[in-house]
Image (cartoon, coloured by chain):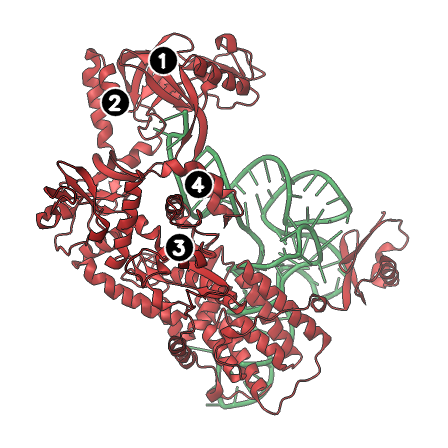
Amino acid sequence: MTEHHPEDGYRPDLVEAKWQARWAERHTNEPDLDRPGRPFYNLMMFPYPSAEGLHVGNFFAFTGADVYGRFKRLQGFQVFEPMGYDAFGIHSENFAIKIGSHPADLIPRNIANFRRQLERLGGMFDWRHVLSTTDPAYYKWTQWIFLQLYHAGKAYKKKAAVNWCPNCKTVLANEQVINGACERCGTQVEQRRLEQWFFRITEYAERLLANLDDASKMDWSASTTIAQRNWIGRSNGAEIDFQSAAGPIRVFTTRPDTLFGATFMVLAPEHPLVDALTAPTERGKVDAYRKAASAKDLVARKVGEKEKHGVATGGVATNPATGLQIPVWIADYVLMDYGTGAIMAVPGHDERDFSFATRYQLPIVRVLAGPEQDEYTPLAEAATETSGFRLVNSGSFSGKAATDGLTAIVAWLEQEKHGKGVVQYRLHDWCISRQRYWGPPIPIIYCDSCGPVGVPEQDLPVILPRIEDFRPDDSGISPLARHREWYQVPCPTCAKPAHRETDVSDTFLDSAWYYLRYLSTEFADRPFDAIRAKHWLPVASYIGGNEHAVLHLLYSRFLAMVLHDQGRLHFEEPFRKFRAHGTIVKDGAKMSKSRGNVVIPDQYINKWGADTFRMYLMFLGPYEEGGDFRDEGLAGPRRFLDKIWDLVGQCAAPTLTGNELHQSIVVKWHQTKKRVTEGLEILSYNTAIAAMMELLNALRASNCVDRAIVKDLVIMLAPFAPHFSEECWERLGGASTVFDATWPDWDDGLTVEQVVEIPIQVNGKTRSRVQVPRGASEKVVVAAARQDPSVTKYTDGKALIKVVYVKDRLLNLVVGP
RNA sequence: GCGAGCGUGGCGAAAUUGGCAGACGCGCAGGACUUAGGAUCCUGUCCCGCAAGGGGUGCGGGUUCGACUCCCGCCGUUCGCACCA
């Protein structure tokens, strides 16, 4: 090994600053969006620009996505890798309130800090196309999208329940309610019903579900598609009408086969028929129950309590199958926002109904029986199975297998017009109203004569005004509603006095279309340029956290479908490939401020350099699983880079000529190219890095300095350590940028050794190894084994029962006792 | 409760998908060079054993010539969803 000269050593601070400046000067990371040869849109989930700056989780996510983008670039694609800021939302607003500042002042500072950090990371970002959702030039088009949905009848207004904190005087998201209390002040949260805007995502449920299985449109992480499937929550069942004095009560059930066992009904307390059904004698109790239910927050309503409580309305309805009059109850375990808000209770075969019936001594009838039971066996607890059960006590349907009975009863219901088979989804329409300040105003004007009117396109954007009293108040309406000068406007249609919608839209609307905007940030007159969209979309690779597996990714898909149906986009699935990265923990525990184990990336970059930091993040565990961040771990990747640096120095020395290469080095070289390439493609970054380390170790062990190998190593390292590799490339005499180099190719024939070592097992235990030429026949290997004393020791005098030979792999001699 | 994943040395992890368990890295131990070493370079490092050998991938069974890998049953753990009719 050559002597180590500290002055020649690798200095990340100098190298990184140098190349970041060069990339900017030379527009290295700016593909021609209008004339792309082989376009590759490499997207990563944009961050919310918090005051704390990017945390190590962001660095991990972005580095992994950037590695992939740089790899694709080296494979000859033109890679568009944009970055932006998801800067609207309740986070910024709450933080501003907390520190007594204004989000409009905070956000630009935070963004500046994020930009600084992102540049230090050395991402291949195209900064010409940066965007922030808070920029009027952006949210103009967020509002435009709202209007496209509104004009297409895909946006509508209805009353819906929200969580309300009476102390903070604000609406809370479900995630902000912890055990029924406000996460910030601990006050019991209650429900309020407000008029809100919704998008009809449920109309798309079937397509959103179907495309998940369409490999030509979507190549996504399985965990993500499963989460989406569960969230959409399709269930097959039937709607059945039970006649009552107040008219038909419609229920939804997935088990119409148990209709004969419905001995009472339960309605959600908010159900519209409750008033009409309530008998005068029960009025007091019913009203008290309904009031108590509405005082509970939405989260508490949804947390299943073992004990089911409710009250009888005194009203009755007719079971269409038995003709019996059954009592109608109300209980908060029935939710107004699922199904029809009313159920037929089958206490014999549903756990909750059983608990309810037991408590209130309502009749329990068996209508399903297993092979061991008959219709007279008393029920001790509810059954839930279908398969293996047959119907009993079910009139002419008795005796049928439950699955056949289900079909037959649905047919009968349809014939008698008592109901029909339907599909129900767990998915709700998307509520986009927020009674807050820090978001894009919903572009609607209310006029007494014309009703709600969409703001005309030429009047967009509806600018979010700067107001100082943006804290939400007791009125339950948005802070903007306190600003008459803002919301009072003439009706765009009839010019009479009218007023603006004062709610703002959900941040998820901002982020549902940002990938479209990146391509076209320079155009003020259109949300996205159709030709560019055609070139570049759908997104070739999208990498992000699985915390957005459901909402963000589902909303983006939905919007793309709507825009596709309107002829504005040529695709309906926006993200061809999606991969969820893992999460980083510190010393085995989730990072949190209270635990004091938050990793601040800047200090690590100061100490080790961005390239070492990137390499360590990619090396510490499988990218899709994440891993444990340990300070000591950075030393390994840094030592690796130092050694490569020295090797490059040796190659650059003019006296060196190519030397005879060992066969084993050639094999290792080709193996490495193969392993790295295949590893990168499947995001197996940790093993790709390990492969390069192995090659380096092999080179050092044999004192081999080969220019061609070192060059390949530098190229393969470039996705992980871009600045470092650029510098090495330059030292090796490479032109302009290593990212214009050609990705190393390998020869499959050279990835295997010509002489292989074969383990010899006796009864499955390895007893020896023999060296044979590659592809040696069983005969040859067995002969070699037969002469090996450490094998014969175990086989002599024993009957050979079987010989298992796997070519180039192993030989197993199975002998008798 | 339902769904998905995970469980391998002191630690982070590999394992060509049923074929040499522990690659690669951290840490640790010993040595070299050094005024020095928290730099660098060698050597060693799953466990028991001086060795021969034996044991070993959360636990218990099974399939197989052969199981970290497949099957059945547990235990632990992480993450979603959750009174969804």
Give the Cα separation between the discs numbered 1 and 3: 49 Å
* Residue ID for mark 4: A208
As rendered, which of A492 and A469 lies closer to the eye?
A: A492
Give the Cα separation between the discs numbered 3 and 4: 33 Å
Please state which amino acid type lies under the numbered disc 2: Pro
Q: Nearer the viewer, mark 1 or mark 4?
A: 4
* Residue ID for mark 2: A272
Q: Is residue A320 left or right of residue A776?
A: left
Mark 3 or 4 closer to N-term? 4
In the picture, the quarter occupied by the N terminus of chain A is: bottom right
Please state which amino acid type lies under the numbered disc 3: Lys
Q: Secondary structure at mark 4?
A: helix
Residue A364 x %, y % = 41, 13
Taking the spot 48% from the left edge, 52% from the top edge, the residue there is A576
Q: Are marks 2 and 1 on the same chain?
A: yes
Q: Is residue A659 left or right of residue A475?
A: right
Which chain is green in the rendering? B
Q: Chain of mark 2?
A: A
Give the Cα separation between the discs numbered 1 and 4: 42 Å
Mark 3 or 2 closer to N-term? 2
Q: Are marks 3 and 2 on the same chain?
A: yes
Q: Nearer the viewer, mark 2 or mark 1?
A: 2
Mark 4 or 2 closer to N-term? 4
